[in-house]
Image (cartoon, rainbow, N blue to C red):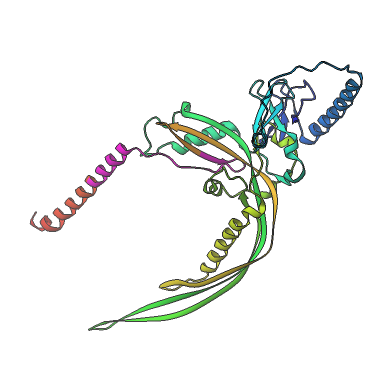
Amino acid sequence: METLSYKCPACDAALKYDGKADRMTCEYCGSNFDVESVKAYNDDLKKRAEEAEREQEEERPEEDNVRSSDKEWNEDEKEQVGAFTCPTCGGELLFDEHTVASSCPYCGNPAMVKHRLSGELKPELVLPFRITKEEAKAALRRFTAKKLLLPKGFADENRIESIRGIYLPFWLYTGKADAMASYSATRVFTTRTPKYDVVRTDHYRLDRRGKVSFSNLPIDGSSTIDDALMDSIEPFDFSSAEEFTTAYLAGFMANKYDMTCDDCVDRAKERMRGSAESLLASTVTGYSTTVKTNSAVSFSDVDAKYALLPAWLLVTKYKGKNYTFAMNGQTGKFVGKLPVSAKRFWLYTLLFGLGISAVLFIIYVLLFFGGMI
């Protein structure tokens, strides 16, 4: 199986994509190039390499076969793990069934599994990274700063187990939702008289209906990624989306989907339904109480396209437990769940309780003994 990387036209080293500059950069000679120029240069290199390989095949004599062990990959293993050759150093790489792009553990250069980027698996769009690795680390430090209940030492940088810039597979849905909802509502009026307070409650039935169009609603297509975590790093700005080319993957990891658009469509419709019902509910204002009694949403023109969206995934370890944080690789939005120190929780609860008690005692003294002073 074949891997793919992009060569520097100046020194032939592997290039990486720099989202800040929107350029392909070389860490060895410092050169940088635009994406289209690098793609054209590497296409030409590939063409010449294929011609040279054909010539060598024609001239190569037959060689004796060397017998190895009879142990081979079974069909399930072939589906789950693939062996590939690094185009830079020749090292043997192993990718799991969902990996599209990674880096070589021997030379550190980026490598892509070419056949997994073609045919039905080829994305239509890609959102390039705009946030760097150092910015992601700094975001984690800011996220953990000044958190009173955070265990001491959790935020130390040496606790970062891994940090990966990864293009994740998403389905971008478009569609229309026709929504209706009914509500039971009340308005309460109070009239004061010399003897009584007269309370009058008016009851209403409210009907709402509307149509909502959705565009580029992202649903992650990987069963291994926490859906709630991915929803939390939204929104993405699709005005800067680019037509997919593998050059944007250089220097980053990338996964392919293992859930089709049909597998994800129910979740997309649930999100559309929730948004449509929230919009209808937002029009019910000016009432003392409102209760939804009925709702229905129908969908039409639902379609999806395959895209790769950027995210930084950071894993830290504390007392044997892993904590995963995610950062939007385009906008920098950072999310994650932090541990809570039980000692600090009870300490601050005690201090808070003592503070409240002191305030109540002062109020009590002022109210009941102030006139006697």
Q: Is residue 190 in view from this perspective?
A: yes
* Residue 18, placed above or below residue 305: above
* Residue 191, placed above or below residue 339: below
Tell me which corner region of the image, top left, top right, bottom left or bottom right, holds residue 198: bottom left
Label count reads: 0
Residue at coordinates 55% horizontally, 49% vertically from top-left? 231
Residue 124, image x, y percentages: 74, 47
Q: Is residue 141 magenta?
A: no
Highlighted magenta segment, given as a residue range = 325-353
206 to the left or right of 175? left
Quadrant assignment for the N terminus: top right
Residue at coordinates 55% horizontally, 48% vertically from top-left? 227
Q: Is residue 217 in view from this perspective?
A: no
176 to the left or right of 364? right
Q: Is residue 346 magenta?
A: yes
23 and 157: which one is in front? 157
Residue 252, image x, y percentages: 65, 33
183 and 330: which one is in front? 183
Tell me which corner region of the image, top left, top right, bottom left or bottom right, holds residue 344: top left
Quadrant assignment for the C terminus: bottom left
285 to the left or right of 43? left
